[in-house]
Structure formats: C-alpha cells, structure tokens
Amino acid sequence: SDAYDVRMKHWRVENLLGPSAIEWLNGDITDRDLVNRLVNEFKPNAVINLAARAGVRQSIDNPWIYYDTNVTGTLNLLEACKDAGVSRFLLASTSSVYGENKMPFFEDDPIDTLRSPYATSKKAAEDLCRLYRHLFDFDITVFRFFTVYGPSGRPDMSVFRFVKWIAEGEPLKLNGDGTQRRDFTHVDDVARGVVAAIDRRPGYETINLGSDRPVEINNVIREIETALGKTATIERHPVHPTDVVATWANISRARELLGWEPQVSLEDGIGSAVSWYLENREWAKNIEL
C-alpha cells in the first residue's frame, strides 16, 4: 500500500529477492480475482498474511481504506484458501487491539477498549479467522506484534522518525512528555517467531510477539542520540487521542508453544536501525514522514 513512502518498500523487495528463487508479484489483497488465482495456482502449504494498511493515526483520516485492506483483504485470502484446500493460515495482527487494558497484555484478555479504526479493523480480521476455524476447520495462528522496529523500519513509526530527525539536525516532534512506554520488538525476533509457527497445526491460537520489557520513549531517544553521537532538539506536542500510555506483552505463550524468546536488545536493535539509516542516508533522508 501507499500508507507510507513506497521507496522504502521497493528497497526491501529488491534486497529480499537478490539472487534467490523467491517469486514476487506486486498485487493487492483486495483484488479478489487475483488472490483466488494465485492461491489456486500455487496451493501453498500455508498462507501468511502480513499485508495490511498499518498506522493508528492515519486510520482516523481514512477508515474506509483500512477496512477494505485489513478486513476485506483478509476475507479474500481466507475464501481463496478455503476454495483451494489450503487450511493453514497465519495472520499478523497488532498490540493495538488491547487498547487501555491492564498490563501486561495476555492473549485471552478482553479487547473492547479499542482506540482507532486501525485497531478495530485488525480485530475484525481476527474475528474472521476465528470464524473460519469454526466453520471450515482451518488451523489458524494470529500474531499480535508489538511496536516492530529495525533496519528499513516503517517511516511512520517512532524509531525511524527519531533517527532521521536527529541525524539530520531537524526538530524531533514528541507527543507528550516521553514517559509513555512501548514494548519495542526487533524485526528479526518477529520474523523468527513467525517462522517457528508455520508447521504447527494448532486449531486456533493467538500469540503475542513482544520483548516483555516496555521502554520509555525518552530512553529510546537517548539510545538513538548515543548511537548517532548527536543530541535531539525536542519539539513538544500534545498527546494524540489514539495514543495509549503503555504497551507490554506477556510472552509466556510464545515461549511455551514456539520455544521463542526475544534475542535482540534495545541497544543492539537501535544500533541496527541507525546503521541502516547511515548506510542508506543518501536516499533515506528524503523519505516522506
């Protein structure tokens, strides 16, 4: 999608493909005919739906496109899998569904304090997965990702923005006083968690993938300052109405079912994000935020 600067996505695709035998097709999961054709043609052992319209704040401005992509798109994939006899389905959901729940967040907590159209669209996608388990005996894993960051990270997320602003000597726009906490999870850890679940036949399961160590935004800024050797110029703004005070994943289920443990420390993770930015600075500094 074009929810953020597509140059970042093109870079990822080019580096993912490289000399490998991966076949890439640029399409849209809201295109039902395309989805049906591909799933029927390849008949994969499993489908992993990482395609989404992401971003809490943007979803307020255009909730329709979030529902089209995250709900209708997921439905298209589930229907195509049903028709092709593919019963293993993995969905990337989000910690945003927990809203203002008590912490840490457990997978079985009620999710009825949602704060954005994005969160409600992902909850609806989860509900569809649960329904297809009930009606058609799918094996479903729903992952709830917590603040994923790392090299070539999303430019609408705090880590990329902070790195860019500090590196380029621009004001760092901070909502609130920076004491908000987020359960930052490195993309390498998230990828390992997804891969660990592919061959499971779980019935229906929801699994948090987080670091289990919430960090204040102020501390993240300090880590980036240290990695860059520069000091941020803070420009303070009011707390956004979609923001929550903190996120914190209980990851006992991931540990038990997947043998998974987050391995990348915040220091190393921030270091990887900063190194990537500096290596790609010539074009990355022009990424639209």
Image: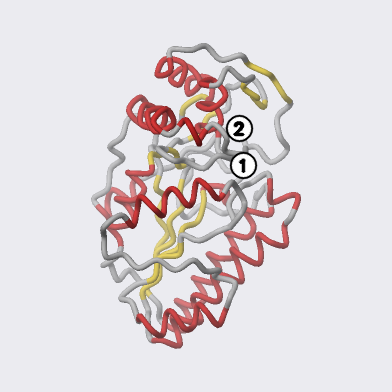
Q: Badge 2: how crowded within 10 Å, few (<14), some, or many (20+)?
A: few
Determine crowd level at label 1: few under 14, some 14-19, many 20+ residues with C-alpha closer than 10 A.
Answer: some
Dot label at residue 133: none
Q: Residue 139, position in %: x, y?
A: 37, 73
Where is residue 197, by image quadrant? bottom left
Q: Which residue is at a point 36% across and 31% down the rendered structure image?
A: 272
State the image quarter where residue 162 is shown. top right
The number of callouts visible is 2
Is 115 in front, or is 168? 168
SS label for mark 2: loop
The residue that mark 1 highlights is 100
Q: Does residue 230 lie above or below 139 as drawn?
A: above
Q: Quadrant of the N terminus?
A: bottom right
Q: Earlier in the sequence, mark 1 or mark 2?
A: 1
Mark 1 and mark 2 residues within 8 Å of each other at the beta carbon: yes
Residue type at mark 2 is Val
- Secondary structure, mark 1, is loop
| Residue 219 at x, y percent in the picture | 48, 20
Q: Which mark is residue 245?
A: 2
